[in-house]
Image (cartoon, rainbow, N blue to C red):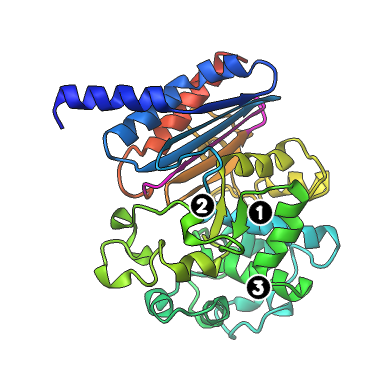
Amino acid sequence: MQRREFSQSLAAALSAVPLVSAGSGGDDLQQKVAKACDVLAAAVAGGQVRAATLHVRLREQRVSACFGAAKTPEAMFLLGSISKPVCMTALMTLFDQQRFSLDDSVSKYLPLAAGSGRELMTMRHLLTHTCGLPDQLPENNRLRAAHAGLEEFVQGALQTPLLFRPGTAYSYSSMGILLASRVAELLSGQSIADLVQQAVFDRLGLQHSVQGLGKFGLADVVPVQIEQAAPEAGGGDPTAKLWDWNSEYWRKLGAPWGGTHMSAADVAEWLSEFMDQGERVLTPATAKLMVQNHNPEGLESRGLGFDVGRNSGSRGCSDQTFGHTGSTGTIAWADPEIRAICVVLTSLPGRAVEPHPRELAGEAVVRGLRLMV
């Protein structure tokens, strides 16, 4: 694209960005996040990102924006791994009911294969990525190609070799979150999709959120730029169209490690439950517990499903920050120090480019907000 053509398309994109503000001082907040909007508008205008939304909160002030193929701020994106703390929020409603303890052995609920220290694996290990299970099963692609249900992934996770004895190391584990979700299903008598809907989304009054697809269809959710996705998501594999991130199979499966669809504002509303301890979903003590570090010194800091600490947000966030990113191109964080929440959802997979526009937009949000507080 020639420089003049790019400038014209960028100007058109910037002028077309719809912003929605609410609450006192919203216009001021809109100005403070303008540079973040510039980042996302430029990424869309340059053809790097096809769709994006932004939602920022500072105390009672709120601003939303949408870009490209995301025609409204309520556009629903595949969250990727932000799904993990969303689903663990549903699990922790059962903790509030005293249905399980974090130090319960996983074998109390699930028939783990014997050996390799599996008897030491606790619920806390599953939620903090210290359980020893791999991120994805060796047979991940085969299961997805066969359109396996979650139960088949569970059976694989129960048998797959551990990377280390539980509690002795850290290794990011989607399969740990899967087994925790299976315990939630057994304790509640509901599918994880139904539990998330009833225990989280309904209690928060969210209208643009669903685990899997539910009542929605493929046309209601934003496609991922799958050609730039990770191999385990079907990226770069022309034979994977029936099981990749954009397939009806994957979108309907509702995998607790990556299958949640939400709008940016809905993600922010869910995060507010932990920053404001609104007691709509969890007790204040449990909400606080989820965003505290549970791992011993020397291991990566993790809450219960959440990433915690300054590295869990954008550059410039405080040590109090908690949140998560998603490999589908998403980031969401809350920083209690400045009473702010930021959600950036894009269609560009996280591995596609460095630095990713979600990171640049998030950093611009932090810089703008710190001028206000």
Q: Earlier in the sequence, mark 2 or mark 1?
A: 2
Q: Nearer the viewer, mark 2 or mark 1?
A: 2
Q: Seen in the image, is 109 located left or right of residue 219?
A: right
Q: Residues within 10 Å of mark 3 (few under 14, many from 20)?
A: many
What percent of the width, then of the height, locates residue 320?
64, 34
Q: Nearer the viewer, mark 3 or mark 2?
A: 2
Residue 152 to residue 257: above or below: below
Look at label 1 and name its amino acid: Leu
Instruction: Tell me the quadrant of the picture where the N terminus can be found.
Output: top left
Residue bearing the label numbered 1:
304
Q: Seen in the image, is 327 located left or right of residue 371?
A: left
Q: Earlier in the sequence, mark 1 or mark 3?
A: 3
Q: What element carries label 1?
A: loop
Residue 79: which numbered mark, if any? Answer: 2
Look at label 3 and name its amino acid: Arg
Q: Decide: marks 3, 2 in contact (CB < 8 A)?
A: no
Q: Decide: marks 2, 1 in contact (CB < 8 A)?
A: no
Say whether residue 254 is magenta.
no
Q: How crowded is mark 2: few (under 14 residues within 10 Å), some or many (20 or more)?
A: many
Q: Which of marks 3 and 2 is nearer the N terminus?
A: 2
What percent of the width, then of the height, locates residue 348?
36, 47
Q: Please give the name of the residue rendered at 19% of the width and 26% of the height, measured from the top-left corner.
A: 5
Q: Please give the name of the residue rendered at 56% of the width and 45% of the height, measured from the top-left corner.
A: 263
Q: Please give the name of the residue rendered at 34% of the width and 41% of the height, measured from the top-left corner.
A: 49
Q: Is mark 2 on a helix, strand or loop?
A: loop
Q: Which of marks 1 and 3 is in front?
A: 3
Residue 164 to residue 139: above or below: above
